[in-house]
Image (cartoon, grey):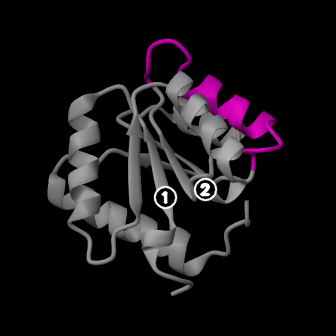
Amino acid sequence: MVGPRKEHLILFVDDDPDDQYLLSSAVNKMDDPPQFRAVSSAEQMFSFLQDCEAQDPVTLPSLILLDLNMPGIDGKEALFKLRSSSAYSCIPVVVYTTSNSDYDINDSYRLGASSFIRKPATLSDMQTCMETLCRYWFDVVALSIN
């Protein structure tokens, strides 16, 4: 392991408060949970990222989980803006959605998604998904230093 997961922050962008609660619960049940922050819109995500950058770029999230279906700026537009930004383009973005559409999968990767995950149906499956995701992104791969 590279370092304690507490040094990592996952930013979850989803307008559904139930999904925010369930994912937060799944993360908190992990043995070595990373920090976790949920916001309800892409606009809030960009505001959060700008605040982090203004404080210290090291405080930027290690990973962003992004829902596609949100009011206002949807997930695809948010992904495009993240990948177009020199400040945020190196942050891995995992599309985390209920969509089963091949078009959404292909479009997400074309726009620069690091991965595409369909939201698990149960809390247990969600916890397994998050443990696997954290193991991969925080223990296996080398992340860019902000």
Q: Which residue is mark 1?
A: 9
Compared to residue 62, the image places residue 122 above or below, namely above
Q: Horizontal and vertical percent for residue 14?
A: 39, 32
Residue 26, numbered circle: none
Q: In front: 92, or 9?
A: 9
Q: Horizontal and vertical percent for residue 119?
A: 32, 44
In this picture, residue 68 sits left or right of residue 127 = right
Q: Amino acid at mark 1?
A: Leu
SS of the residue at dot 2?
Answer: helix
At x 80%, y 34%, the residue is 84
Compared to residue 56, the image places residue 40 above or below, namely above
Q: Quadrant of residue 29?
A: bottom left
User: In the displayed image of the protein, which residue is found farthest to the bottom?
Assistant: 1
Q: Is residue 88 magenta?
A: yes
User: How far is mark 1 from mark 2, CA to CA?
Assistant: 8 Å
Please report contact status of discs 1 and 2: CB closer than 8 Å, yes or no: yes
Q: Is residue 10 magenta?
A: no
In this picture, residue 130 sits left or right of residue 145 = left
User: In the displayed image of the protein, which residue is found farthest to the front?
Assistant: 55
Q: Horizontal and vertical percent for residue 18?
A: 20, 34
Q: Amino acid at mark 2?
A: Thr
Task: Work out whether mark 1 precedes mark 2 in sequence or the reverse, and give the earlier one.
Answer: 1
Q: Which residues are magenta?
A: 69-89
Q: Horizontal and vertical percent for residue 126?
A: 26, 56
At x 25%, y 30%, the residue is 17
Which quadrant holds the C terminus?
bottom right
Q: Quadrant of residue 145?
A: bottom right
Residue 59, numbered circle: 2
At x 16%, y 54%, the residue is 123
